Image (cartoon, grey):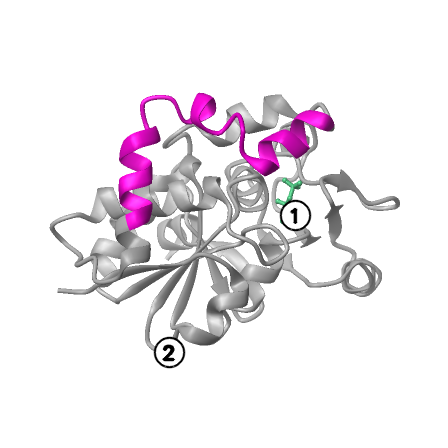
């Protein structure tokens, strides 16, 4: 039976061997929830990059849209910040978006040695779980955290995924057990549970509570963004075309 494990921060990735494994990269607030939303609105590709300049270079070279966030705030001169709602207000159908965020895009790029990288969020939790059950690879949930530190919301997602996969995957390490226990404690009202958490507090100071509520909804979208040679594509769309 395959296993599921959790890496609480990209800074801990050196302790994990990702080769031959499936990584679920997660930044609930808000990068991976926003990417899932962009695909649900019809985006064709998302290119995660580390730096603001990489984003600008891609826009100049390939004419793609750009999204950039630092410390919760939209960076000047880019098309989007990091709110899922911005992709509902714009027409992104068939478009490519180059994106850089404080932690989320970093977690994805640093997972590059994995067999497969899947973009996870509560919004596409069931779709991700079904895909992993079919894939039958060992799974590492890579939490984006905040500047190398642990955070609650990504850990809660890891616990939700572990709960979905219970009976089909083993939970061999305490990180996965802790995430599962935390989710079981909090799942009755994730929004209330997260009120004191550092990033919810940070987003509140920026008046971004609407995004928090949105990103905690379960199974809103049936999209499956996966890493494909330096960009993310929605496997659901590609499967239905094939
Ligand atoms: O850290 C990140 O990648 C972002 O998701 C943070 S924020 O929610 O946009 O502030």
Q: Name the residue nearer the viewer: 22 or 4.
A: 4
Dot label at residue 95: 1
Q: Is residue 126 among the parts visible in the rendering?
A: no
Q: What residue do we see at 43% from left, 35% from top?
A: 123
| Pointer 2 with pointer 1, Cβ within 8 A | no
Considering the image in quadrants, where does the C terminus appear? bottom left
Residue 76, compared with residue 16, is above or below; it is above
Considering the image in quadrants, where does the N terminus appear? bottom left
Q: Is residue 234 among the parts visible in the rendering?
A: yes
Mark 2, secondary structure of its residue: loop
Q: Quadrant of residue 62?
A: bottom right
Residue 139 percent across, percent down from the top left:
31, 62
- The answer to whether residue 156 is left or right of residue 232 is left
Q: What residue do we see at 28% from left, 44% from top?
A: 180
Q: Name the residue nearer the viewer: 130 or 211.
A: 211
Q: Quadrant of residue 21?
A: bottom left
- The answer to whether residue 1 is left or right of residue 68 is left
Residue 84 percent across, percent down from the top left:
61, 34
Residues in magenta? 178-205
Whether the magenta-drawn stretch holds residue 193 is answered as yes
- The answer to whether residue 133 is left or right of residue 63 is left
Q: What residue do we see at 53% from left, 54% from top?
A: 144
Disc 2 or 1, which lies upstream in sequence? Answer: 2
Dot label at residue 19: 2
Residue 238 percent across, percent down from the top left:
42, 54
Q: Name the residue nearer the viewer: 146 or 25.
A: 146
């Amino acid at each position: 039976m395959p296993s599921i494990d959790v890496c609480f921060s990209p800074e801990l990735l050196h302790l994990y061997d990702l080769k031959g494994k499936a990584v679920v990269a997660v930044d609930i607030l808000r990068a991976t929830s926003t990417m899932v939303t962009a695909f649900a609105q019809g985006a064709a590709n998302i290119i995660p990059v580390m730096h603001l300049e990489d984003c600008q270079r891609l826009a100049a070279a390939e004419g793609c849209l750009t999204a950039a966030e630092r410390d919760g705030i939209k960076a000047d001169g880019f098309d989007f910040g990091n709110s899922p709602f911005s992709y509902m207000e714009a027409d992104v159908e068939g478009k490519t978006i180059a994106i850089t965020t404080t932690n989320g895009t970093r977690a994805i790029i640093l997972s590059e040695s994995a067999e497969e990288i899947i973009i996870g969020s509560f919004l596409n939790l069931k779709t991700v779980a079904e895909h992993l059950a079919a894939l039958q690879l060992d799974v590492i949930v890579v939490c984006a955290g905040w500047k190398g530190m642990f955070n609650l919301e990504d850990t809660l997602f890891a616990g939700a995924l572990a709960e979905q996969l219970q009976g089909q995957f083993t939970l061999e390490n305490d990180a996965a057990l802790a995430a599962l226990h935390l989710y079981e404690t909090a799942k009755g009202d994730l929004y209330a549970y997260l009120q004191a958490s550092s990033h919810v507090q940070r987003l509140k100071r920026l008046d971004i509570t609407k995004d928090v509520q949105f990103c905690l909804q379960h199974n809103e979208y049936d999209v499956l963004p996966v890493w494909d040679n330096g960009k993310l594509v929605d496997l659901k769309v590609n499967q239905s075309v094939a």
